[in-house]
Every structure is written in structure tokens, then in C-alpha cells.
Amino acid sequence: MDASLLDVALAALSVLLEPERLFYLGMGTVIGLALGIMPGVGGVAGLALLLPFTFNLDAYSAFAFMLGLGAVTSTSDTIPAVLFGVPGTSASQATVLDGHSMAKNGEAGRALSAAYAASLIGGLWGAFLLGLTIPVLRPILMNINSPELLAFSIFGLSMVSALSGSMPLRGLSMAGFGILLSMVGGDPQTGQERWTFDTLYLVDDLPLLPVALGLFALPEICDVAARRTAISDSSKYELKEGMLVGLRDAFKNWWLVAKCGSLGAMIGAIPGLGSAVVDWFAYGYAAKTVKDADKTFGKGDVRGVIAPESANNAKEGGSLVPTIAFGVPGSASMALLLGGFMIHGLVPGKSMVTDNLDVTYTMVWSIALANILGAGLCFAFSGQFAKIATLRYTLVIPAIISIMMVGAYQASADWGDLFTLLIFGVVGWTMKHLKWPRPPLILGFVLGGIVEDYMRISYQIYEWAWILKPVCAVMLILAALSLLQPLFTRIFIKKEKVEFFAFSGPQVRLIDLFPVGLLALLGWALIGSFGWDEDSQGAPQVIVLITLAITAITLTNAIFRRGLAGYSEGTALDLSSDLGGLSRGSYNLRVFEFFAWLCGFLFAWWVGGILLASTLFVIGYMRIRGSESVVMTTAYVLVIGCLIYFVFDQGFHIAWPESLVRSLFPELRGVIPTI
């Protein structure tokens, strides 16, 4: 950075440090932290809410306000991820694996502290890299086209071998299934409906939010409800000491933070990838490179918290790169930021690194200062947050379920969001307890649509010659090596004997019904695809056939107990299942009861609206299931009701569905609220 750029950067800092602009930065940061704690809400909804309030602000204050919010939702979303196993936003999905395991081991304070420190360092590192790359933005990004983006996406999918523990075949099968789920809906090129069951909801594709919450959040809450205990034993907590240990962990692993922060910034700069995958990329990278990760990741390894948290905060700096240089948003939040550009008469491109360079550097400083302020606030209150994990389950579950239901519904404001949440909740719980890894499924779901779009564009322009482009060739080779890494490790490092087709007597078990059901579903999907337009059949049928083959091998391997060496059963890189001393039959009965409560919640919502549903659910669960006091239950009902009304209804203006009562009695619409 030459002297003139340094002068502009320092001048931008002095502008941002003026009291009025610091106030807006602080307000945005506080709002962002609050939204990150609420599962399913996130920074995109918050930025949409803030955008109208920036009309009367100068450009410096407006972007400080918006970036203050956007930069820290990935900091506070760690709180529900660690304490409840519920990702606050899509950027904290990978944090759940080791963070929640640490909370159950009585190390919530350590996990939160390590996460905040990693988020702070990663966010500052991302902002620093953004500041350094501003002078050279254009020549770098001009060389990234559809083939390169496709190769990056394929490399991301290859991470399933790291996200599947010692069962990469199961991971590949789930990744393929996730890609197929991403293809549900209308073909973006031909408009052909694919696996929509003739429902309008599925025509617009499955939304990520209810799928992610169903796979990762509901199963953990369900297990807490089935065990009927607190998430962790309070006697295990040493909060002050744990906070210090977590802080030391982050600085001890500074090189991991720097590498994952750089990875996060790079992925953030690639349009279309964004926050939904950056944490999985970082987690997969750490799982492949950290010493003894195969033995400790997924069981409460603090490095499994540090890696994704340093990456998901660094991505904000990276996602500003294409937004500033080309007006191509690196994420959904950056798309809203472009709205701020238009409001204030700014044009992305050359002018942002010449005439408006001071505004650009103000954005860099806003991200840096927001990360410092956000991490400081989280550190200050982490001790109190960690204690939540010791509360009775009847005090935790009603609030989480109420917020989760609303958060899932706002994905597309359709009843289908809630049914999707429940369906994938059942699927996620089943996968968890049968040790089928869930991370590859969500990674395939996120990247599937991107891979299909870029594949179509790349083939139309280059045909198969895109594979030979230098960056593409390197990334594809790395992807192949990533997939084969577990097998190479066993052969060349552990020196184990490899018997590729060694079989023993067949042993069919109840758990083998899962791959049998998956094979049946894939067969149905393949048959259904033959009725589509020819242009819409190619990619889905290829993915179905590959997934069918992998699932069949997995089932054969399970039945005969042996098979492809290095790809046998083992430990899934996922949260472990604790039955709490119950028999499997008793545990499953409690799980069924919990899902019955959720169905009752939806039924009450359909009859009388969300306020009635949340009120009945809180009263019923706290009084009937937990025998909580009338005073406690009443206070709980009032808090949840105010949150739904003031935040979601009046704040986010969610389009609530028409209740049965309002539909049957139109004359009561002026009396009975929409919610």
C-alpha cells in the first residue's frame, strides 16, 4: 500500500470515528448481535429492515450502520449453535459439530470464548485483506469466469470426504442426494418442473433455511426434549477459567485462524458461494490438515470451533470485493448493500477505487471496528450466555421452538416452509442416530444449483475444453485428491492391508433400511425424470445414477460387513447421540411425543394464528410437561408474545398466513389480528 492509499485509509478512519458515525456503527452492531442469536433470522433480514432508514444519512454513516449489522451476525450466531446445537444463521452450521459437543461436556464458556476470539481475528484479517486488495481488484476478478467458479464448487463438494469421518461413501451418497434436492423446482433454463408433486411451493425451489434448521436444529432440540435434562451439568462449569482457556486456544492456533480466515475471505469473494458454505469449507480444510482431527473432530475439539468461526467472519471482507469492483454481490447481504449504493448515488466499479476511495475504505474500517465491538460485547456477556445451557429443558425449548418456527416460516412465507422444517427434522434425527453424516447433505444442497448453472454455461461456451483451463485443471486435481485422501491415508501412511473386494457372510440389520429407502427414492426420482424435456434431464439423471451406484455399494458393504477397504463403517463426523440412560424404545417414544407437540403447534397456528399457537405451546409444554409455576409460565408467554409482535410482525412485517378462524368468520377480521 503506497503512501497516498495509506493517507486515504487514515482519513477514512478519522471520518468514521466521528461521534455520529460511531453511534450508527454501534447501533448496527448491537442489532446484528441480537439478530444472530435468533435462529433463522440472520443479517439479510436485518439489512432489509435497515435499508429504508439510511435514506437521510450520509454515505459514511449509512454504510457504517449496515456493515455494523452485517459484520457481526456471524459472531453472535455462535451462541445458539454452541448452547443448543441450533445454528443461528447458515454461517454457524459447522460450529454446531464441536461447539455443541463442548457445551455438553461442560465447556460452553471455552467454546464461546474461542469462537469470539477466532471471529474477531478472522474479521480483522478479512478487512485487512480487503484493504490490501483494493488496488488490484480488477485484474484478479476479471480472470474468474464460470469455468473457474464451477471448479471451485466441485472442489467444495470434494470436502465430503473430510465431513464424513471414516465413512466417505455415505458422505458421497448424501452429497449426491443434497444436489438432487437443490434441483427440485423449476429448471432455471427451460422452466421444466422437476420433482415438484404439482405443488406451487416446490416450483420456486426448496429454501435453505427450513432445510438447514430441520437437519441440524430440530434433531438436537428433540434429543434434549427426549432426555428431559439440561444441555449440560452445571457442576461442570468453570466459566471464568473456561473463557480464559478459550482465548488462549484461539491465539495458540493463530496459524489455523489465519489460514481459515484467508480461505473465508477468498470464498466470500466468489459470487454465489457466500455464507452457506464458507464454514463447511473451513471445517473440512481443518479436518484434513489438523493433527489427529480424525480422532477428535465432532467430539468437542476446540479447533473445530476456531476454523469455521474465523472463516465466516472473514467472508464479509471478501464478499465486498466483487460488490465494490463490479457490482456483483458476493452474498445476499451484499445484494442489499448494493441498494445502499444506489440510494447514495454510488456506482460500483472504477469510481469506487478512485473518486470514492474514501467511502470504500470507510467500509473496510466499519467491518474491522464492528468486529472489535461485537466480539467485546459477546465476551462481556458470555458467562451469562453459557449458563443458559444449565437451565431446565422446559425453560429452553419453548422459546427456541417458537422462534425457530417463525424463522423457518419467513424463508418464503409459505406453509410449505413449516412442513419442510418438520420433514427434514425427522430426516436429520434419523440420519444422526443411524450415523449417516448430515454435513455432506447440506453442502450438496447449497452447491448443487451453483454447479448445475455453471456447468451449463461452461459447456455452452467451451464444451469440455473448460476442464483444461489452468485454474480449473488444478482445482479438479485437488478435488480428486481430496476424495481419495482417506484411502491413500490407510494405504501409504497407516500401512494397512487393503482388500478391495473382501466379503464375509451377509448380515441384514434394521439400520440397513435407511439406504434401502434411499435407493427406492432415487429409483423413483430417476423414473420420474424420463417425462421431462430433454434439456432438463441431463444433469439430474447423471447425479441420480452416480448416487444410486454409491448408495448400492454402501448398502452392499454394510450387509457383508466388509468391502472397499478404507470405506467401511466407522465414526461419522457429526454430533454423537446420547440416550441419557434410556432404552432405545423409551427414547424413541419420547421423540415421537416431541414431534407430536410440534404438530400440535402447527395445528394451533393454522386454527388461530402464531400468537395463539405460541401461547398454547408455551403453556402446555411448561405446565404439562415441566410443571413450571404459573408465574414463570405467564412471564414466558408475555415475553414470547412481545418478541413475535414487536420484532417479527411490526419490525420485519412478515406476511402471516390467514388463520382458519379469520377465514370462516370474515366479520371478525377487524377484531382478531393476523398473527
Image: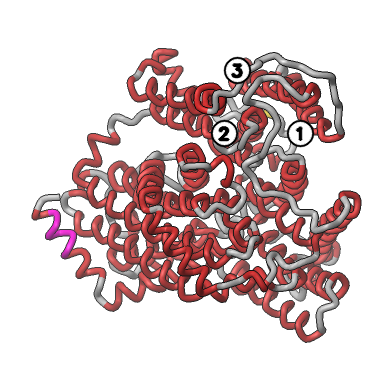
Work out whether 141 lies above or below 55.
Answer: above
Q: Secondary structure at mark 1?
A: loop
Q: Nearer the viewer, mark 2 or mark 3?
A: 2
Where does the magenta region start and end?
5-10
10 Å crowding of disc 2: few (<14), some (14-19), many (20+): many
Callout 2 amino acid: Val
The crowding category of the residue bearing disc 1, from other C-alpha atoms within 10 Å (few below 14, some 14 to 19, many at least 20), is few
Q: Earlier in the sequence, mark 1 or mark 2?
A: 2
Q: Residue at x 72, y 82 (%)?
A: 635
Q: Which mark is residue 160?
A: 2
Asked if residue 8 can be seen in this view, the reply is yes
For the residues carrying marks 1 and 2, which lies nearer the camera in this image? 2
Task: Return the residue nearer the eye: 14 or 227.
Answer: 227
Q: Which residue is mark 1?
A: 197
Relative height, residue 136 to residue 314 (above, below):
above
In the foreground, 234 or 494: 494
| Helix, strand or loop status at disc 3 | helix
The spot of residue 189 in percent (x, y) is: 54, 26
User: Which residue is tagged 3?
Assistant: 538
Given the image, on which type of amino acid does mark 3 rest? Answer: Gly
Residue 600 percent coordinates (x, y): 84, 60
What is the x, y in percent for residue 618?
Answer: 78, 72
Q: Quadrant of the C terminus?
A: bottom right
Magenta span dominant secondary structure: helix
Q: Are marks 2 and 3 in contact (CB under 8 Å)?
A: no
Residue in view at x 12 percent, y 60 percent: 7
Q: Residues within 10 Å of mark 3 (few under 14, many from 20)?
A: few
Calculate the distance from the C-alpha at mark 3 to the C-alpha at mark 1: 20 Å
